[in-house]
Structures are given as structure tokens and as C-alpha cells.
Amino acid sequence: MREWVTVIGTAAPRGVLLIPAVVLAVTAILLRCRRIGPPTR
């Protein structure tokens, strides 16, 4: 069980930093798709 705690402890900071990066990437892709494609509304 101690090994899992260490793995989670080392992966937690990376995940926290990776989540916002993924969100920004997804939002950028969606904005590009909306600009290129026809307006949704």
C-alpha cells in the first residue's frame, strides 16, 4: 500500500498541472472549430 501512496503523491502535482493544460487545449480546439465551421447559433 505504501507504494501506491508514493505513486499517487508523485503523480498528483503532475496531474494538477496537466488538467489546466488539457482544458486550455480543448477550449482552443473548440474555438478554432467554431471559427472555421458554421456558427452554432
Image: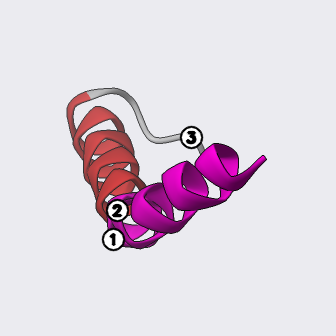
Picture disc at residue 5: none
8 to 36, vertically: above or below: below
Whether residue 24 appears in magenta in the rendering, the answer is no
- Name the element at disc 2: helix
**Earlier sequence position, callout 3 versus callout 1:** 1
Callouts 1 and 2 close, C-beta under 8 Å: yes
Q: Which mark is residue 14?
A: 2
Query: Viewer-nearest of labels 3 and 2?
Result: 2
Q: Position of residue 23 (x, y in %)?
A: 43, 58
Q: Which residue is mark 3?
A: 40
**Label 1: which residue?**
17
* Of pointers 3 and 2, the one earlier in the residue sequence: 2
Residue located at (45% from left, 59% from top): 15
41 or 15, which lies in front?
A: 15
Q: What are the residue bounds of the magenta stretch? A: 1-20
Structural crowding at the residue carrying mark 2, measured as other residues with C-alpha within 10 Å and reported as few (<14), some (14–19) or many (≥20): few
Secondary structure character of the magenta stretch overall:
helix
In which quadrant of the rendered view does residue 11 lie? Answer: bottom left
Task: Give me the residue at 35% from left, 59% from top.
Answer: 18
From this view, report whether residue 13 is shown above or below residue 27.
Answer: below
Q: Which amino acid type corresponds to the residue marked 2 in the rendered image?
A: Arg
Q: Residue 34: image x %, image y %? A: 36, 41
Task: Residue type at mark 3: give it.
Answer: Thr
Q: Is residue 13 magenta?
A: yes
